[in-house]
Image (cartoon, rainbow, N blue to C red):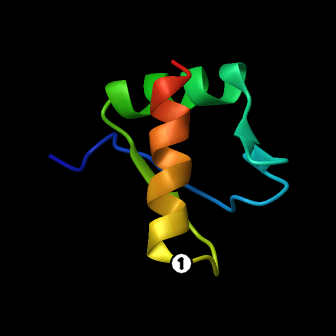
């Protein structure tokens, strides 16, 4: 099941989130990444609540 699966680990602040916004193109790319069966890891020092909010914002923008 893991054969061919890839993992992307990324930071949030200044990488995906700029001024509390996830760019449309970035959100769409992450949706395509996950739809292809790959794993996405958000590596951050931010709280779980803030990460959940960022994910919700990204989902809403796609």
Label 1 element class? loop
* x and y, in percent, of residue 21 in the image: 74, 39
* x and y, in percent, of residue 48 in the image: 45, 73
Left or right relative to 42: residue 59: left
Left or right relative to 12: residue 36: left
Q: Which residue is mark 1?
A: 47
Quick one: 42 or 55, which is closer to the camera?
55
Q: Residue 45, located in which quarter of the rendered image? A: bottom right
* x and y, in percent, of residue 53 in the image: 50, 53
Instruction: Give the residue at x 33% y 40%.
Output: 4
Left or right relative to 35: residue 41: right
Left or right relative to 49: residue 50: right
Q: Residue 50, located in which quarter of the rendered image? A: bottom right
Q: Residue 58, located in which quarter of the rendered image? A: top right
Q: Is residue 17 above or below residue 36?
A: below
Instruction: Give the residue at x 30% y 34%.
Output: 37
* Mark count: 1
Instruction: Give the residue at x 14% y 46%.
Output: 1
Q: Is residue 35 above or below residue 54?
A: above
- Neighbours of disc 1 within 10 Å: few (<14), some (14-19), many (20+): few
Q: Is residue 32 above or below residue 42?
A: above
């Amino acid at each position: 099941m893991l054969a061919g699966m890839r993992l992307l680990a990324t930071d949030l602040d200044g990488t995906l989130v700029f001024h509390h916004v996830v760019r449309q193109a970035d959100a769409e790319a992450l949706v395509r990444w996950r739809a292809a069966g790959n794993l996405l890891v958000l590596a951050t020092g931010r709280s779980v609540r803030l990460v959940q909010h960022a994910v919700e914002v990204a989902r809403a923008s796609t």
